[in-house]
Image (spheres, rainbow, N blue to C red):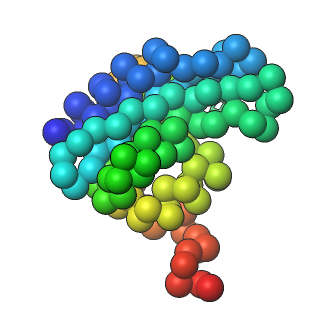
Amino acid sequence: MTDEELVQKAIEYRKNSYSPYSHFAVGAAVLTKSGKVFGGCNIENASYPVGICAERTAISKAVSEGERDIVALAVVGDTPGPCSPCGMCRQFISEFKIPKIIMANLKGVRKTVTLEELLPFGFTDSDM
Ligand code: THU
């Protein structure tokens, strides 16, 4: 699976976004070492903080299926530039040491960064 194919998966999953409060739809997709793809979208809640971001939905789907070895994550929003994961998602991405993060939008913009670039000085198990 190419990076662009993973972005296209994230775009597909974005269509399932449940975002009646922000009206900001986000899609994500993760690729596992075994070659499987898990997609996710943001799912909001009337109690706002209860909502979950697309990235954490996609990662949770992979991990709960026993697929913890994730090699790439793509995230897409209708943003002017590349759609950037929030701080909480960066920490979640860091937990599973996802080495490649592809940030994209609907206009064809793509920016690929490493985990180190996404979350410098992150708190990890090695800090405990
Ligand atoms: N959102 C994501 O799904 N991923 C991010 O990394 C940024 C924010 C969602 C959360 C909320 O449903 C909406 O975008 C507006 O913040």
Tell me if 71 is positioned left or right of 25 in this view: left
Residue 80: tell me if it is visible.
Answer: no
Q: What residue sits 53% from the left and 44% below the top?
A: 56
Quadrant in the picture for the N terminus? top left
Residue at point 68%, 26% (across, down): 44
The furthest residue to the front: 65
Q: Quadrant of residue 100?
A: bottom left
Taking depth in this image into account, of 85 and 35 the one nearest to the observer is 35
Q: Is residue 85 left or right of residue 87?
A: left
* Residue 17 as seen in the image, left or right of residue 52: left
From the top left corner, tell me how far across and down residue 6 is, in percent: 28, 35
Count how many numbered circles sit on residues in the image. 0
Seen in the picture, residue 16 relative to 53 is either above or below; the reply is above
Relative to residue 122, is residue 64 drawn left or right?
left
Ligand 1 rendered quadrant: top right
Residue drawn at x 23%, y 42% is 36
Residue found at the far right of this picture: 47
**Percent of width and height locating residue 5:** 23, 31
- Residue 87 is situated, as x and y percent measured from the top left of the image, at 64, 52
Q: Give the vertical position of 60 relative to 38 (above or below).
A: below
If the image is split into quadrants, where does the C terminus sit? bottom right
**How far across and down, in percent of the image, does residue 81 sit?**
50, 32
The quadrant where residue 109 appears: top left
Q: Is residue 11 visible?
A: yes
Q: Residue at x 41, y 51 (%)?
A: 63
Is 5 placed above or below 74 here? above
